[in-house]
Amino acid sequence: QVQLVESGGGLVQAGGSLRLSCAASGRSFSNYIMGWFRQAPGKGREFVAAIRWSDGSTFDGSSLKGRFTISRDYAKNTVYLQMNSLKPEDTAVYYCNANRGPPYYPVDWGQGTQVTVSS
């Protein structure tokens, strides 16, 4: 079983930055893709970005490209989401997830971390 613990959320003014962390434990992640999703109040869960653990290849949500960057620290088993130029519409609960494959399917989700961007 994979354990995922997110941190780094909080309140920030528009234009500011935050870095979210997702600490992963429980197994080897060599055949995993780790992802970030978000869910705003009253909306469905939206894909933000993902990274293949083995080689660091990244996949970005098209609407967020250029402002959000996903990365991973292999030694710390941690995935990061650097968020810059934040907007009020980025306000959401951000979730980390683990996907095993190929073909990839989700095997676990973190508890989520709240990001609130004030105007």
Image (cartoon, rainbow, N blue to C red):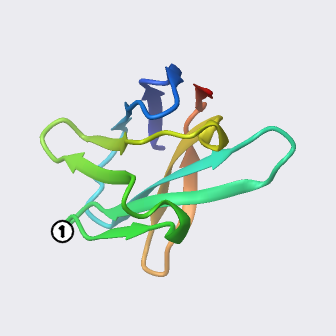
Q: Is residue 42 left or right of residue 51?
A: right
What residue is disc 1 on? 55
Q: Horizontally, is 5 left or right of 51 in the view?
A: right
Question: Which residue in the rendered view is the most extreme toward the right?
Answer: 42
Q: Could you tell whether 89 is left or right of 18 in the image?
A: right
Q: Nearer the viewer, residue 112 or 48?
A: 48
Q: How many marks?
A: 1
Q: Position of residue 9 (x, y in %)?
A: 49, 24
Say above or below: 62 vs 19: below
Is label 1 in a helix, a strand or a loop? Answer: loop
Q: Residue at x 45, y 43 (%)?
A: 2
Please state if 53 lies on the left or on the right of 95 as rendered. Answer: left
Quarter in which the C terminus is drawn? top right
Would you identify the image quadrant in which residue 75 lies? top left
Give x and y (percent) for residue 88: 63, 36
Q: Residue 84: which quarter of the image? A: top left
- In the displayed orientation, state which residue is furthest to the top: 11
In the image, farthest residue toward the bottom: 103
The outermost residue toward the left is 75
Q: Nearer the viewer, residue 61 or 5?
A: 61
The vertical placement of 5 against 58, above or below, is: above
- Callout 1: few (<14), some (14-19), or many (20+) C-alpha neighbours within 10 Å? few
* Three-letter amino acid code at the position of disc 1: Asp
Where residue 53 sits in the image (x, y, percent)? 27, 60
Q: Position of residue 45 (x, y in %)?
A: 71, 53
Compared to residue 20, the image places residue 83 above or below, namely below
Residue situated in front as seen by the camera: 68 or 8: 68
- The one nearer the camera, 107 or 74, is 74
Q: Quadrant of residue 19?
A: top left
